[in-house]
Structures are given as structure tokens and as C-alpha cells.
Amino acid sequence: MTKLNIVLFGPPGAGKGTQSQFLQEKFELIHLSTGDLLRAEIKAESPLGNEAKELMDRGDLVADSIVVAMIRNKIEAHLDAKGFIFDGFPRTKAQAEALDEMLDGKDEPIVAMLSLEVPEGELVSRLLHRGSEGSRTDDKDEAIIRNRIKEYSQKTAPLKDYYSAQGKFKAVEGVGTRAEITARLVKALG
């Protein structure tokens, strides 16, 4: 059985969490969110969580080696899964190469990289709104938000080229109702 392994991509505030939940239910996939994994470590106040919190509060990315190890552990814990949605991972070419190596070794490659495309002004507005309603300190300060978007653009957006070269990159407009965006994602999976 071919696994449906999807990378759900987009800048902070693009709606990855919302859309991955729908895709997870529709296709019976395991959702792997590095953000969720890191927030769990932060809540537990583990050494990894404390280090991650310090980096995230500045709007910086967490080291590849830490994130790759967390993802590998989750994949190994769900060997019978129908597939995975990788949300917030990979963020760098090194992470993408490590993920490909992990999955290709099991003959279960990434099928598609779905990229939610949202203008920066809309992202800032969404994140400030989310920050005003919750406890995410990194969503309450516009300067930190803009730094996260800049980090994404500089370090993560080049992954579009990486997946384009494999014929797996699919841009999806991330503005509209949740249902409209969901329909675009399902259509992109063909």
C-alpha cells in the first residue's frame, strides 16, 4: 500500500493547522506538527522545551537536529499509518533531505508538497488576531510576527524549489473560506 505522505507548507498564519486537521480526517493520516511537538516540550518545561521556547520567543527556528530526531521518533511510533501530514516540517533543505532519506528508506516518499500562499498583510492580521484570543506570546507582537515571516521567507521558502525539482510542489491559494481552501487542497492532491 502506497502511503499518502504530504508536506503542508506555508508561512506562520497561513492556516496549516486548520487545513491539516481536515486532511488528517479525510485521508486517515497522522498529523505531525513540529509546533505541537515543541509546545508539548515547552509545557513540560523539559530542557529541549526551554531551549525551544527561548528561540521561538525571538522568532528564530529550532535546530534541525532536534526537530529531525523528534519527527523520526513519531514516524517510528506509527509504522502502520496510512500516511503522514508534515505540518511545519521540513523548514530547511537539510530537514527535507533528512525526511526524504527517512521515508525513501521505507519506500514511502513524500507524494506532494502543498503550499498555502497568503499575502504578508493577511498573515500579520491573522496572527495578531490569534494572539489577542490566546496565550501564544509569539502571536502578540507584530515585530516578532514579521521576524517569523522573514525567517520563513529566507530559510523555508527555498524548499519550494527543492520540491519543484521533484515535481511535488503545488501552490494553493490560502485566502478564502475554510471550505474553499480545503477544496483547493483536495483538488491539488488529484
Image (spheres, grey):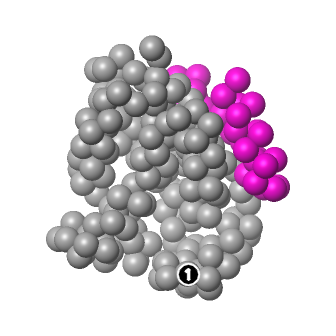
Residue drawn at (55%, 81%) of the image: 134
Please tell me in which quadrant of the rendered image residue 175 appears. bottom right
Residue at the (82%, 55%) spot, across then down: 176
Res 51 visible: no
Q: Is residue 97 above or below residue 172?
A: above
Above or below, comparing residue 121 to residue 29 in the picture = below
Q: Is residue 106 magenta?
A: no
Q: Secondary structure at mark 1?
A: loop
Above or below, 78 against 2 in this view is: below
The residue lying toward the viewer, choosing from 154 and 86, is 86
Q: How packed is label 1: few (under 14 Cα within 10 Å), some, or many (20 or more)?
A: few
- Quarter of the figure with the C terminus: top right
Q: How many marks?
A: 1
Q: Is residue 73 visible?
A: yes
Query: Would residue 43 be found to the left or right of residue 113 on screen?
Result: left
Q: Amino acid at mark 1?
A: Gly
Q: Which residues are magenta?
A: 161-190
Tell me where residue 102 appears, x and y as whole percent. 30, 29
Task: Say above or below: 158 vs 109.
Answer: below
Which part of the image, by quadrant, shows the N terminus? top left
Q: Position of residue 121 (x, y in %)?
A: 73, 70
Left-right relation of 44 to 4: left
What residue sits 68% from the left and 71% below the top?
A: 126
The image shows residue 181 at horizontal and vertical percentages of 76, 47
Q: Position of residue 158 (x, y in %)?
A: 52, 44
Quadrant in the picture for residue 34:
bottom left
Judging by the rendered image, the residue that carries numbered circle 1 is 134
